[in-house]
Image (cartoon, rainbow, N blue to C red):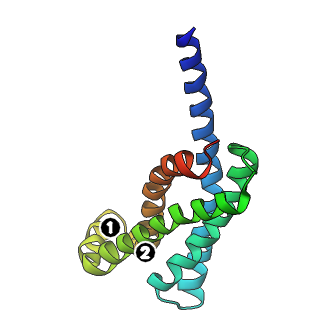
Amino acid sequence: MSFFLRSKRLVISKKSFIKYILIGFTGLALDLLTFIFMVRVLGLNELFANPISMTVGIVNNFFWNAFLNFKRTDNLFRRFLTFYSVGLFGIFFGNTFLWFFHTVIGDYVNGILLFASPLAAHYQLELIKATSIVIIAIMQYFLNKRFSFRP
């Protein structure tokens, strides 16, 4: 009996993770598009634009996960505060990641990208941002599952 129970939990957990990733792509798209708009069109500094764009993605992801994935809509405000607290960790990590790979060793990263492709080098900032989002999403899944959407 316990084997079947563990198997069922694993399948549910994998489905939840897959839904989380799919929902994450919508948040990633909103985050990245907002970021690109603010940096490339409005001319804002990337370290200022990043927390704003990430907040857009976080809010999007919270509602999709609350209603569609984890189906936990009780105590919605408390759950949102917990989810956003996890998001703040992601915002801090994202800004640190951008600062380090774009500002501190940006010339080195640009050289590598230029060697690979001039087009990639042109979009260095966007590639660094997208990479940080993927790393953050994986960390946040486990934190949000454990804290934001626990029963």
Tell me if I can see residue 66 in this picture: yes
Pointer 2: what residue?
125
Q: Nearer the viewer, residue 148 or 58?
A: 148
Q: Is residue 1 left or right of residue 76?
A: left
Residue placed furthest toward the top: 1
Give the image location of residue 130, x and y in percent.
Answer: 48, 63
Tell me if I can see residue 119 in this picture: no
Q: Earlier in the sequence, mark 2 or mark 1?
A: 1
Determine the residue positioned at 34% across, 78% down: 99
Determine the residue positioned at 43% across, 63% down: 132
The kind of residue on which mark 1 rests is Leu
Mark-to-mark CA distance, 2 and 1:
11 Å
- Assign a secondary structure to mark 2: helix
Residue 75 numbered mark, or none: none
Q: Is residue 16 above or below residue 125?
A: above
The kind of residue on which mark 2 rests is Leu
Residue 113 numbered mark, or none: 1
Whether label 2 touches label 1, CB < 8 Å: no
Residue 77: quadrant of the picture: bottom right
